[in-house]
Amino acid sequence: METAIFSRVDRSPLGQWWWTVDRTTLFAFLSLAVIGVLMVATASPPVAERIGLDSFYFLTRHLIFIVPSVAVMVGVSVLSPRWLWRLSSLAFPAIILALIAVLIFGAEIKGARRWLPIAGMSVQPSEFLKPIFALVAAWFLARTKKHGNLKAAAVAMALYAVCVALLMMQPDFGMTFVLTAIWCVQVFLAGLPLRYVFGLLLALAVGVMIVYASFDHVQSRIDRFLNPDSGDNYQVEQSLEAFRAGGILGAGPGQGSVKLRLPDAHADFTFAVLGEEMGVIAVVCVIGLFLFVILRSLARLMEDDDIFCVLGAGGLLSMLGLQAFVHMGSALNVLPAKGMTLPFISYGGSSTLAIGFTMGAILCLTRRKTR
Amino acid sequence: MIFYRMMRRNAAKLTGDRSAMLDLAHGRLVALSSFFAIIYMVLAVRAFDVSVVQAKFWNMEDAGAIVVAEAPEGKRRGSIYDRNGNMLATSLDMASLYADPYLIADPEKTARGLSDIFPSLNFGKTLRSLQSARRFVWIERNISPRQQEAVMQLGEPGLAFRYEEKRVYPAKNEMAHLVGMTNVDGRGLAGVERSFDRMLAKGQDVTLSLDMRLQHALHREVGKAIDDFNAMGGAGVIMDAHTGEVLAGVSLPDFNPHEPGLSEAAAHFNRLTLGVYELGSVFKIFSTAAFLETHDVPMSTTFDAREPIKVGRFTISDYHAEERILTVPEVFMVSSNIGSAMMGQAVGGQRLRQFYEDLGLLSAMNVEVAEVASPLVPDRWGEVATMTASYGHGIATTPLNVAAAVATVVNGGYLIEPTFVHAGEGGKARNNRNKISVISEETSYKMRELMRLVVTDGTGKNADVPGYRLGGKTGTAEKSGAGGYQRKKLISSFVGAFPINDPRYVVMVAVDEPKGNKKSYGYATAGWVAAPAVQRLVKTMANILGMAPDYDAPSYEHPLRQYVALEG
């Protein structure tokens, strides 16, 4: 049936898109979105009731955001890399302005200013900064590589510094960490000599230590991970117990009980709900799905000779992979607990749109080039 | 700008050679892919570890614990039992009733039914909360099983229960200090609840050496002594002389562990293990034992107690002054400070100190509660310290230290470290596993004779229970306060052991600041305060433990009579 719609000789943009886009990855993203709707449906009602909202508040809002997000994903993937760059270069200054606005107008929640009220909803501009920054930085680095334009690399470095400064003023260590990871992966892919790579890793380690030493809550989080007896590990303990209760086959959809006790079951601990209700088989499937997408897309990049695509998609894939890893690793206690949503699966509100954009950009940059 | 320099060099190298550049990028892509492959593999392995491997053990440990949503620990706290299996502390799931007004079909009928079941509920208020728009309202906390049953009979789906673990102490005040208590989150705060917190939290039970019946008797008698003599407080202990097991331990005033906040801070203080006191003449047991252990002399050895001893600016005199030359049994019997100080001198400062140390009197006890104090020992153990330490001044220990050291002296001489944990049926307490001999059998035997003499003829006559051959020693110590020792503020104690021919139990009662009454002719000394309490205690113990009296046993103290020139 599809071939009837998109004939191989179809030269229209949509026809071209269908034959050049990585359809397997597209379906992987769509299945993540479907799993996400199921997980939000089962995990969020107890959370909503606990904070006095309608039972289906989060599910409704998740659907309101996931449908446009999928549309954004498809829409962005239709663009050409050049248009993607144009779009990003326009969006970047707007996001920087939004980040400044957050510092001025944003409401302070738990000691940080991260949210901006736009059109009746709370938007976290830093969620959108991540993919846009990855694309902008990729473009500048690519210019350096293609034309030997050294100023371009300097510009990329300066943009990174500005973004980090704005994020640290909120403060938001999670975002800073992800942004730094994107930047490091990109300079690594761009061919930074190995001795500098080691220097970079060393600088990162020093940075982590400085943050550890100067911020009490970061320190306590890490201490509690390294030595579970030293403090309150309620969420992590509950999360592990959920996996244990789930076992191999799980308690069955909707039958879990960890969501009754975890404050962030719908967002930062969705993975634990998945573990309890669907069992380890589903857990490994989701881990596999993320890994599959990352490895497959990276493999496609190897056949690509456009350095902008390699750097951009490499940065975005790392961001996706790292964010999912931190979420799953926190729930499984292989990392200190850090609240991050599982892309497309957790309830994420407006940030779901940013995820849709990220996935669309990955699809766009990994499309087969027509020669 | 390290990147800038690096980029310049790289750019120069790579411009115009795009295929080399892409080869490099591709190599790096492989590295990146490997990195992600590895970290995701770790995740998958970890997921398998938690969900399958750990789940297996977890399910065996406590299947279904996750169902109890209100117990974050997932496990019910273990219980504490006495040596006979009586419950001293346990956790009960107490139901609390709440309503989801959204699901209540007939608020009026439900409110009427509830106000019938719970007399404290007001119909109007209950109805209003059942008609509210909220999804959760508490109706009544900690309800009884009978009330819960009645609520279920209402058959109202909008009513539900939450279960909260509540710690219950059936013995209430009587065991409060040793068993201890927990905080609202069920973590041990004091006593055994605290020291065994890890075990109890895992759901394991603990069986203590305590005997609820003996504890009750001891609690009653120490309490009576305090009441009779209008005292500030008191402490008492019953210990197995051979195993060191504490069968009963009391500190008064005490508190109700269900409502610890209602008692003043002093009531929470465990005088038995945490209070250090100068206990006075009971220490003559130890200095005399040291003397007999180090000097192979007959009991007829004499000490000149005619004149108080002057050492530097100190004067050592006798409370019950005899003002004559005393033999060893006489010194012990009439509790002569002068005689004991001379014995201490004869033993020598270093040796006396070492002897006390061997008995465990100079260090904090290694015992299973956290509330343990270190004894206060003179910094410089000079001549004066040696002499005062011989009759129990200048050195402050816990009552439990003293009881354990007495057990060591009377049981044939091997070291007793007190314990609160039941050694088990036929099991051996740690004291019996590696018997450490502190004094010889012979000295132990002599000390038992001397202690019996105190009860038959000396200061402890009021403690005697015919047929049970109690031996012991009184101690009346002036409390030190601002400006030196205070004549009116005493700690009166009695420590004894019975049956003295082969002691099974060490008993001790100490009363803090007793005031003389009519019956005691105004005396507040140990012989009048603590000795009668021990007498009553031993009588009760004999009943509880089913010990038959032996009226025909040979008089144990008889061999010493020849050295005693006094009439009782």
Image: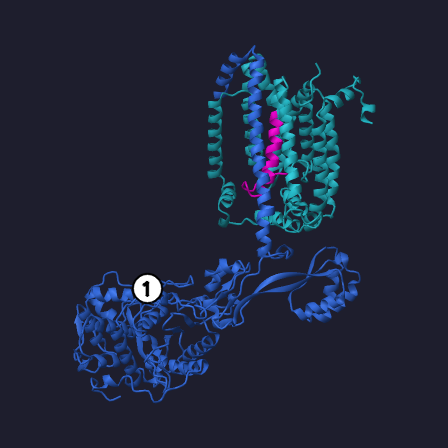
Residue B449: percent from left, percent from top: 27, 80
Q: According to the colouring, which chain is cyan?
A: A
Q: Residue at x 65, y 23 (%)?
A: A300
Q: Magenta region: which residues?
A: A314-341
Residue B403 image-quadrant placement: bottom left
Subunit under mark 1: B
Left or right: A111, with B132 as reference point? left
**Pointer 1 residue:** B375
Q: Residue at x 37, y 62 (%)?
A: B366
Q: Is residue A260 above or below residue B295?
A: above
State whether residue B285 appears in this view. Answer: yes
Asked whether residue A144 appears in the rendered view, the answer is no
Q: Is residue A318 magenta?
A: yes
Q: For residue A97, which quarter of the picture?
A: top right
In the displayed structure image, the side of residue B174 where residue A263 appears, left or right: right
Give the percent coordinates (x, y) of residue A82. 68, 18
Chain letter, colour blue:
B
